[in-house]
Amino acid sequence: MSALAWSEELVLQHPQMDATHLKFVELLNAAETALAESEAAGLSAWDALVAHTIGHFDQEDRWMLSTGFAEDNCHTRQHQQVLAIMQEVARLARDHQDFGPLQRIIPELAAWFSMHAQSMDSSLAVHLEVAGFDPVTGACRTPQPEGNAPISGCGSDHCAPDHAPAA
Ligand SMILES: [Fe+2]
Ligand SMILES: [Fe+2]
């Protein structure tokens, strides 16, 4: 059984986000499979997931900045927390041969991602749709309101900094 199955619940009707999320799920499952084979293979697969996640989070953070979010909005902060944990787990495995945190984080990250996609990312997909945001050009069809304060909350009921997975 894989760490996380792709399902309709994860589909946000946003093609770029959905493609990125599908790849995230594939790489997470690949890391779990590789780790069952050997620690070296598991770490290599984990590194591939971390590299993909840097681009994944950066993409969403850029979209938010382009559509009225504050730089330190709660969604971006959660990305930063999760990425830091993922990188720390890789460091412990690589530098200290401590693979326990890597073993433990995979199911935690699967549960976190499922919740994150269905809350913060889902809210972002709606926000981008309302803004008429084109991820290719970075332009918005809907004029952005002027004079509004930058958005600091994600608009979901998970708008809190303590929803990161524990390693
Ligand atoms: Fe995402
Ligand atoms: Fe996100």
Image: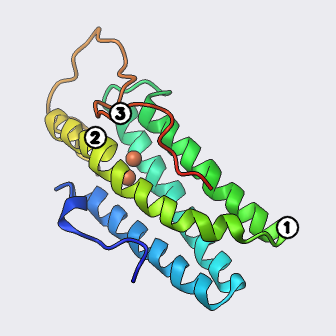
Label 3: element kind: helix
Contact flag, marks 1 and 3 (Cβ < 8 Å): no
Is residue 91 left or right of 109 when viewed as pictured? right
In the figure, 122 relative to 3: above or below? above
The residue labelled by disc 3 is 66
Looking at mark 1, is its residue's CB closer than 8 Å to ligand 2? no
**10 Å neighbourhood of mark 3: few (<14), some, or many (≥20)?**
some
* Residue most extreme to the right: 96
Residue 124 bears which disc, if any?
A: 2
**10 Å neighbourhood of mark 1: few (<14), some, or many (≥20)?**
few
Residue 73 image position (x, y, % from top left): 44, 28
Residue 74 image position (x, y, % from top left): 44, 31
User: Which residue occupies 48% across, 48% down?
Assistant: 58
Image quadrant for the N terminus? bottom left
In the figure, 15 relative to 81: above or below? below
Task: Report if residue 137 is visible in the image.
Answer: no
Contact flag, marks 3 and 2 (Cβ < 8 Å): no
Q: Disc 1 vs disc 3: which is toward the camera?
A: 1
**10 Å neighbourhood of mark 2: few (<14), some, or many (≥20)?**
many
* Residue type at tag 2: Leu
Label 1: element kind: helix
Residue 96 bears which disc, if any?
A: 1
Looking at mark 2, is its residue's CB closer than 8 Å to ligand 2? yes
Is residue 145 left or right of 52 when viewed as pictured? left
Residue 63 image position (x, y, % from top left): 35, 40
In the figure, 107 relative to 116: above or below? below
Which quadrant of the view contains residue 151? top left
Task: Report if residue 93 is visible in the image.
Answer: yes
